[in-house]
Image (tube, rainbow, N blue to C red):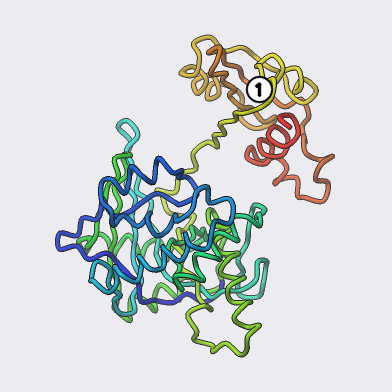
Amino acid sequence: MPAVFPFRAVQFRSDSGDVSDLIAPPYDVLDAPAKARLTAKNRKNVVAIDLPHTPAKELGPPGAYEGAASLYRSWLAEGALEQGGPAMFAYRQTTRTGSTVSRRCGMACTVEVVPFGPREGGGILPHEETFSGPKQDRFALMKATRAQLSPIFGLHADESGNATKLLHGYMEQHKAEVRAEMGDGVLHEVWRLTDGQVLRAYQGAMAGEDIFIADGHHRYGTALNYLHELEGRGPVAPDHPARRCMMVLVGMSDPGLIIWPTHRVLGGMKDYTVEAFMAAAQGSFSFEPVAGGLSAVEATLNSGPRGGANRFGVFDYKTGRAYIATTRQADPLIEHFPQKPAAWRGLDVAVIQYLIVECICQ
């Protein structure tokens, strides 16, 4: 994989270590009302800087990004934010679903910025397309603040399990320095790692690994664009901060790495009715009614066959009617993407996006 490094992180100053009122979900899942709720709890919530313009799907006015940069610099000047020395940060998310507790562990570090795609020694591999609007928004913010404000979520194979073992071992032997809860049932904990031996062991465990971007394609694309612009002005030093990008890396061997179902809420479609949707989709899907509404959909899906055709739960909010939709073709995207691998064409997320959202719901 591209080399990984410690970095000089900017953190909120907190005597108690609790930063619950200061952190925010990823910028691209928030709208203006959600931002307002966070800043109402604490005006110094990071969302005030990280989301200066809504929606973040398009470029906002220059003043929005200039205001975010001014706010960022003022918090640094007054000591609300402070920059520490080089470190990596072990990060754990604990979630509870009923009686089940899961803990997802990763390492926040910086990664060498290299173009998307396979490369000798490991590459940065995307799984979705990016759009110009979000990248313009993130680029304007990065250019104004000269900072990367939220990490990218990356996965790596970790077939040996060494990186995951290192993280779990450190967490078991040390107390977390930072914690936060945002009321969604997730406990966030962070450990600051500065021991050179530990950092070198982690770097060794990551040698040769590919990074698969799970979330943050637009942010990584922005890091590439930012570096490219700097290089257009002249030589960029090998140790320039723009050559490194902040990521949280989670090994696929981590027992807390749980992949939840993909959900899409579709609205605003002209002349929509559930009958019209099923009529438009009848060539691609068969539909089975589900008694009991939304609460019964999951149980019905779980009781069905594994493998084979793609199966989705469909719920119509207006009527309260629910269905199981099953693809009629074994390879439903082959006509749209014959050049893509069959494994990709069979992913539920690909079928939802390209067959349902972009074709049927147009």
The C terminus - image quarter: top right
Which residue is depicted at the point 80% across and 23% down?
283
Snapshot quadrant of residue 280: top right
Left/right of residue 354 with respect to residue 100 in the rendered view: right
How far across and down, in percent of the image, does residue 145 sit? 44, 70
Snapshot quadrant of residue 290: top right
Left/right of residue 64 with respect to residue 187 in the rendered view: right
The N terminus - image quarter: bottom right
Which residue is depicted at the point 63% across and 58% down?
126
How far across and down, in percent of the image, does residue 193 sit? 30, 72
In the structure shown, which secondary structural element does the residue marked by tag 1 occupy? Answer: strand
How far across and down, in percent of the image, does residue 218 sit? 58, 58
Spot the residue most to the top: 291
* Kind of residue at badge 1: Ala
- Residue where numbered disc 1 is placed: 325
Left/right of residue 158 with respect to residue 311 in the rendered view: left
Q: Is residue 26 above or below residue 193?
A: above
Which residue is depicted at the point 55% across and 56% down?
60
138 or 175: nearer the viewer:
138
183 or 165: nearer the viewer:
183
